[in-house]
Image (tube, rainbow, N blue to C red):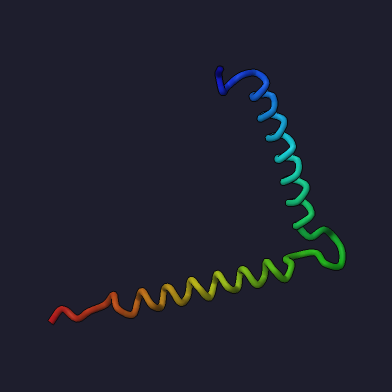
Amino acid sequence: MSIINRRNAVLGWSVWQIAKATSKRKAKQAVPGKGDHAGLNKGAVAGLGAATVAALLFWRKKSDGSFTSGS
């Protein structure tokens, strides 16, 4: 008995199509629309701020010990 057959291929294809449609719908709902709340939402701003702080801390820590005197 083969694992890859027409029935499993059709089932996998249909699950893939449903998953794509669901993810597209959720992505559209996550993006703020036109109107009063247009632009970045609070979660996106917080994530962007946290990523910036983490990058600055990483850069600062990396640059602290990288320069040593040659004497």
Direction from residue 36 to residue 51 in the image, left or right:
left
Identify the image quadrant of the C terminus: bottom left
Q: Which residue is at a point 22% across and 79% down the rendered structure image? A: 68
Rendered residue at 75%/40% (across/down) = 21
Say if 11 sits above or below 23 in the image.
Answer: above
Residue 9: which quarter of the image?
Answer: top right
- The part of the image, by quadrant, that contains residue 2 is top right
Query: Which residue: 77% across, 51% down?
Result: 28
Exactly how many numbered labels are in the figure?
0
Write the residue at 60% across / 73% down.
49
Q: Locate residue 7, reporting x and y percent.
A: 67, 21
The correct choice, above or below, for 62 with respect to 12 in the image is below
Q: Decide if residue 52 is on the left or right side of residue 60.
A: right
Does 31 sit left or right of 6 as displayed? right
Q: Toward the viewer: 29 or 3?
A: 3
Residue 27, position in %: x, y?
A: 73, 51
Q: Is residue 32 left or right of residue 59?
A: right
Considering the image in quadrants, where does the N terminus appear?
top right
Find residue 35 and report its horizontal and vertical position in percent: 87, 63
Residue 64: give x, y in percent of width and height: 33, 80
